[in-house]
């Protein structure tokens, strides 16, 4: 029989190491919730940075406080640049998405850690949160009738009476809305998983692969920032396209 090629694998992490050295059912639990565990590690890191930057708030900000204020203002300007003045309402959500995704992307660069965003279950959960919030915001802002009118392409006059055009636009917009969580999640997952896999292969080269590993790590850091930014940009565009008003 022909010999099969070994499966491509990611770098080992602390949770997978523990799962290999403990008995059932604990090992099965760790395997199943590996990405959830590292997602909570990312939450813990973000909470630590938030605590360090917000304690002892002063009129003249200290280093951490000043850095976070500059970051928050930058995110607010970025979101409002895409969505307009109404973007201030959604800056906390989109800014939190960016920070959380960026932290999870970079987590895989820490020894014995893993990027939870390399798993589709994590990125799909994020995309579903975006989808649900967008639908809720659209219904709250436009109303049921206004949102249905938006899905039908806002037909007026003869187009509204033709029936065919409103139905076509309704199913087109509905299909687009349902596909967006898939495209958001798969784009992020595929890029992060590919980056982690690439680093794992270069680390297998040993000392001879250190120069290219260092260069690849720098690229992965840049790619992690870019992927978090793209997810946030698409989310802001998603909001702006759904919440558009005639006035």
Image (spheres, grey):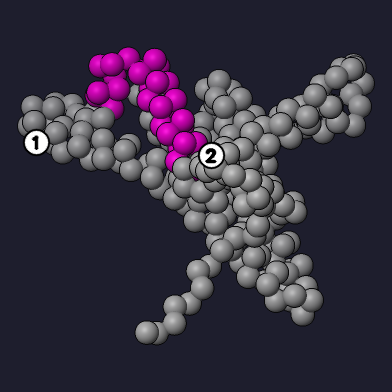
Which quadrant of the rendered structure holds the C terminus? top left
| Mark count | 2
Q: In this image, 212 relative to 34: left or right?
A: right
In the image shown, does 121 or 69 lie closer to the viewer? 121
For mark 1, what is the residue?
A: 164
Q: Position of residue 210 (x, y in %)?
A: 78, 73
Residue at x-position 82% and y-position 26% = 53
Residue 119 versus residue 177 in the image, above or below: below
Q: In this image, 169 relative to 179: left or right?
A: left
Give the mark nearest the N terminus, 1 or 2.
2
In the image shown, does 219 or 247 lie closer to the viewer? 219
Secondary structure of the residue carrying tag 1 is helix
In the image shown, does 88 or 200 lie closer to the viewer? 200
Residue most extreme to the front: 23
Magenta region, main secondary structure: helix
Secondary structure of the residue carrying tag 2 is loop
Residue most extreme to the bottom: 2
Which portion, as a residue range, is magenta?
Answer: 123-150
Residue at x-position 76% and y-position 67% = 214
Residue at x-position 66% and y-position 65% = 199
* Distance from Cα at disc 1 to Cα at disc 2: 57 Å
Q: In this image, 171 relative to 227: left or right?
A: left
Mark 2 crowd level (few <14, some 14–19, many ≥20, 10 Å Cα): few
The image quarter containing residue 65 is: top right
Residue at x-position 86% and y-position 31% = 64
Q: Position of residue 38 (x, y in %)?
A: 63, 41
Q: Position of residue 157 (x, y in %)?
A: 14, 26
Residue 219 versus residue 23 in the image, above or below: below
**Is residue 134 located in the magenta-colored stretch of the structure?**
yes
The image quarter containing residue 244 is: top left
Disc ID at residue 25? 2
């Amino acid at each position: 029989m022909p010999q099969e090629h070994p499966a491509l694998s990611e770098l080992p992490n602390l949770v997978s190491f523990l799962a290999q050295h403990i008995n059932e059912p604990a090992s099965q639990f760790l395997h199943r919730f590996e990405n959830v565990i590292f997602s909570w590690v990312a939450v813990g890191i973000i909470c630590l940075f938030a605590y360090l930057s917000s304690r002892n708030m002063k009129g003249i900000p200290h280093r951490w406080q000043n850095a976070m204020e500059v970051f928050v203002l930058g995110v607010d300007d970025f979101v409002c640049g895409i969505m307009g003045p109404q973007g201030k309402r959604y800056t906390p959500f989109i800014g939190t998405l960016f920070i959380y995704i960026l932290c999870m992307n970079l987590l895989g660069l820490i020894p014995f850690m893993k990027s939870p965003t390399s798993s589709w279950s994590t990125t799909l959960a994020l995309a579903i949160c975006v989808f649900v919030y967008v639908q809720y915001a659209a219904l709250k802002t436009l109303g049921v009738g206004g949102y249905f009118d938006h899905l039908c392409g806002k037909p007026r006059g003869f187009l509204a009476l033709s029936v065919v055009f409103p139905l076509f636009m309704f199913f087109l917009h509905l299909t687009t809305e349902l596909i967006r969580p898939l495209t958001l999640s798969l784009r992020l997952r595929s890029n992060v998983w590919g980056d982690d896999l690439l680093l794992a292969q270069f680390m297998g080269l040993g000392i001879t692969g250190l120069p290219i590993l260092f260069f690849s790590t720098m690229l992965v850091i840049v790619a992690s920032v870019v992927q978090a930014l793209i997810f946030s940009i698409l989310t802001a565009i998603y909001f702006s396209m759904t919440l558009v008003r005639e006035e």
